[in-house]
């Protein structure tokens, strides 16, 4: 049986009643199941992002970097929790705590 994975949204792990199978493209096997985000999940994510921006835009860049460095390994894509920069624009995966 495929493992079910919740998605991280607005500071919490969530799922919905709209399942989405994750398919292995090599053999067509279902390797996991997640769910589509709802319209409310989208609204919650936007609100959380706006709130976070309002808080972090007042910080100096070294203060924001220190926050990112405290993320656990794997939460941001690289050692220390932060993905390495990609080109001049930075980059990496969105961060979130490990799934429960």
Image (tube, grey):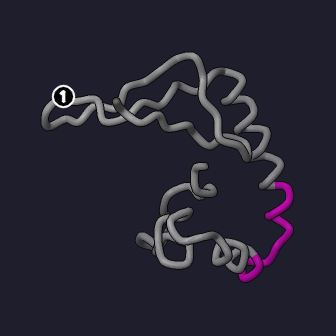
Position of residue 41 measured from the top left corner of the image (x, y, whole percent)? 68, 29
What residue is drawn where x is 78% and y is 55%? 53
User: Is 75 located above or below residue 30 in the figure?
Assistant: below
Is 48 within the magenta? no
The residue lying furthest to the bottom in this view is 62
| Magenta stretch bounds | 54-63
How dense is the environment of label 1, judged by Cα within 10 Å: few (below 14), some, or many (20 and up)? few
Position of residue 65 measured from the top left corner of the image (x, y, whole percent)? 67, 77
Position of residue 79 measured from the top left corner of the image (x, y, whole percent)? 49, 77
Residue 80: quarter of image: bottom right
What residue is drawn where x is 48% and y is 62%? 92
- SS assignment for the magenta stretch, majority: helix
What residue is drawn where x is 85% and y is 55%? 54
60 vs 8, left or right, is right
Task: Find numbered disc 1 in the image and state the secondary structure of the residue it sits on.
Answer: loop
Residue matched to label 1: 28
Residue 75: quarter of image: bottom right
As rendered, which of 77 and 43 lies closer to the eye? 77
As rendered, which of 3 and 24 lies closer to the eye? 3
4 vs 66, left or right, is left
């Amino acid at each position: 049986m495929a493992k079910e994975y919740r998605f991280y949204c607005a500071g919490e792990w969530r799922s919905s009643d709209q399942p989405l199978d994750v398919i292995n493209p090599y053999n067509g096997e279902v390797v996991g199941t997640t769910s589509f985000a709802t319209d409310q999940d989208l609204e919650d994510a936007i609100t959380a992002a706006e709130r976070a921006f309002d808080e972090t835009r007042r910080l100096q860049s070294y203060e924001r970097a220190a926050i990112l460095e405290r993320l656990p390994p794997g939460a941001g894509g690289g050692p220390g929790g932060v993905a390495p920069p990609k080109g001049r624009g930075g980059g990496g995966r969105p961060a979130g705590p490990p799934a429960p």
